[in-house]
Image (cartoon, rainbow, N blue to C red):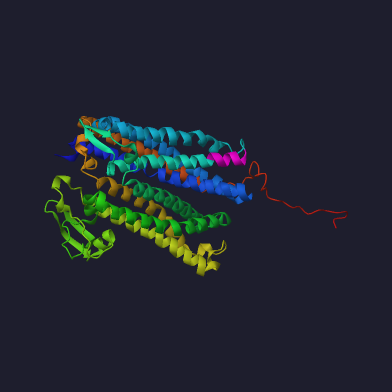
């Protein structure tokens, strides 16, 4: 059947498009909220106006990003009822509650304090404003936690059993703290921090390259990069741990990620394919470029550890291979590029300090352009990683318990085609609008207005010359 006339494919395509667009925005919202809290806390603690100006500038980026995230996320919530009715009915006792927790606990917390954070600079004390910013940061992180609880449960369902066609929860604790949650939330949270630091570093690099506000953006560039020196390698380590855990929780997904068709024999290691041409019909790779034993080493930390191949599973239970295989490699390459840029910049800051001063930093054009390229690389990494996570779970909507085909609503092909087209047009429009607004913020640059009030105990001390009789 033509895919464009396949109701299941169209519903999956629509939800996939909505999710891939939506996930562009919350990671920056979450990470940038934490950065804003740190900057504002530094202002309250030290009274240095530079931290106030930094917080005010990055808040403009945060506001645009937050708004698009909210607008793009609402249709996704409704899609569970419109396009995935049978899944919602079967899993609603748990899945619906978790989404309700996210709305009541997290989103409402963000929304309640967002107004104070954005418009309360001149209306509340510095301490109260800092508290509001902290609540927005906490709420956004809590939102990510509950969303990842729901998604992780779909990946590794626990505390649940099938009863009369419904997924009945036997233990809420086990369902919430399922085997994938620690890795899934940890990897996603670090991605939020990483992409936010990359954006602050990349935007700062743009200004430095164009010789604009160097005294303002060089410190932002430095603290972004120094933070990434820790965050980027840590993200790689968490990702490696999450990948190794798949051998126990989702071995078919792991095999698809590595395009590994056959379980390695005892005493032999599983090879790692750098590039390959997967052929699911023939249950093999038509061609491949491999490194011996590396998959066994990565997954089991042994050169001859056993790694299950795809042929251990029925063809009907095998996930697609092409997207997880290449999506994973794109994600790793993008993440590796960011880590390389962070470590390279650290070396320059350490060995060539004279070239990292406001008057000379513009000479490092290759470095600054590299950080500007790191921004799309970070977004590509998130998109690729989400594709690997979701496509690799197929053909299950709840892994091992409910197939995707069982969870889709019966909607006419014509309705699905028009709704998909409508979402593409609508989301493209708001995406373009967001970029236009962000371009306006970047063109205007920071505004160096005095704070409405200084933190009482840490106000800057301003001295003026005292003129005594005759000017002496």
Image quadrant in which you'd find residue 22 = top left
Residue found at the far bottom of this picture: 351
Count of numbered marks: 0
Task: Locate residue 352 relative to residue 292 in the image: left or right.
Answer: right
Position of 69 relative to 190 (above/below): above
Is residue 431 visible in the rendered image? The answer is no
Identify which residue is drawn at 36% across, 43% down. Answer: 23
Q: Locate residue 226, reporting x and y percent.
A: 49, 59
- The residue lying at 46 percent from left, 52 percent from top is 197
Q: Residue at x 61, y 46 (%)?
A: 44
Q: Would residue 126 be counted in the magenta stretch?
A: yes
Query: Is residue 261 rendered magenta in the image?
Result: no
- Position in image of residue 62 (x %, y %): 48, 43
* Quadrant that contains the C terminus: bottom right
Q: Nearer the viewer, residue 47 or 442?
A: 47
Q: Main secondary structure of the magenta part?
A: helix
Say which of 300 and 396 sits in front: 300
Q: Quadrant of residue 5?
A: top left
With respect to residue 101, does 242 lie above or below? Answer: below
Residue that sits furthest to the left in the current view: 282
Residue 393, x across and y down, in percent: 24, 45
In the rendered image, the quadrant that contains the N terminus is top left
Relative vertical location of residue 107 with respect to residue 449 in this rendering, above or below: above
Image coords of residue 123 (percent x, y)? 61, 35
Q: Is there any visible trace of residue 175 in the rendered image?
A: yes
The span picked out in magenta is: 125-132
């Amino acid at each position: 059947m033509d895919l464009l006339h396949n109701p299941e494919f169209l519903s999956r395509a629509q939800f996939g498009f909505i999710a891939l667009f939506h996930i562009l925005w919350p990671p920056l919202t979450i990470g940038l909220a934490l950065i804003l809290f740190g900057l504002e806390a530094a202002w309250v603690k030290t009274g240095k106006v530079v931290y106030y100006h930094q917080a005010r500038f990055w808040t403009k980026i945060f506001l645009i990003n937050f708004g698009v995230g909210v607008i793009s996320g609402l249709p996704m919530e409704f899609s569970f009822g419109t396009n995935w009715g049978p899944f919602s009915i079967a899993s609603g006792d748990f899945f619906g509650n978790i989404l309700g927790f996210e709305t009541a606990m997290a989103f409402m917390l963000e929304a309640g304090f967002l107004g104070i954070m954005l418009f309360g600079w001149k209306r509340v004390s510095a301490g109260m404003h800092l508290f509001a910013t902290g609540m927005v940061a906490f709420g956004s992180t809590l939102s990510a936690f509950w969303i990842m609880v729901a998604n992780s449960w779909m990946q590794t369902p626990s505390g649940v059993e099938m009863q009369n066609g419904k997924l009945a929860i036997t233990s809420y604790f086990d369902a919430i703290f399922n085997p994938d949650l620690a890795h899934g939330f940890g990897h996603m949270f670090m991605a939020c921090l990483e992409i936010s630091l990359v954006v602050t570093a990349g935007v700062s690099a743009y200004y430095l390259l164009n010789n604009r506000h160097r005294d303002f953006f060089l410190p932002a560039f430095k603290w972004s990069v120094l933070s990434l020196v820790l965050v980027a390698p840590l993200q790689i380590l968490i990702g490696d741990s999450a990948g190794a855990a798949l051998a126990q929780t989702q071995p078919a997904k792991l095999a698809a990620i590595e395009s590994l068709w056959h379980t390695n024999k005892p005493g032999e290691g599983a090879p790692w394919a750098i590039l390959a041409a997967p052929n699911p019909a023939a249950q093999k790779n038509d061609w491949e470029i491999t490194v011996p034993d590396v998959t066994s080493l990565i997954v089991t930390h042994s050169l001859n550890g056993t790694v299950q191949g795809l042929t251990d599973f029925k063809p009907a239970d095998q996930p697609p291979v092409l997207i997880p295989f290449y999506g994973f490699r794109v994600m790793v390459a993008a993440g590796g590029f960011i880590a390389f840029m962070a470590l390279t910049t650290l070396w320059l800051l350490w060995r060539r300090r004279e070239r990292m001063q406001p008057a000379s930093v513009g000479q490092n054009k290759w470095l600054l352009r590299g950080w500007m390229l790191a921004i799309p690389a970070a977004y590509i990494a998130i998109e690729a990683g989400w594709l690997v996570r979701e496509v690799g779970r197929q053909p299950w909507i709840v892994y091992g318990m409910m197939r995707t085909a069982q969870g889709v609503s019966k909607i006419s092909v014509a309705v699905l085609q028009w709704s998909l087209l409508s979402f593409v047009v609508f989301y493209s429009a708001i995406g373009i609008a967001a970029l236009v607004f962000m371009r306006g913020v970047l063109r205007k640059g920071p505004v160096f207005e005095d704070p409405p009030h200084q933190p009482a105990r840490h106000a800057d001390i301003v001295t003026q010359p005292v003129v005594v009789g005759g000017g002496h």
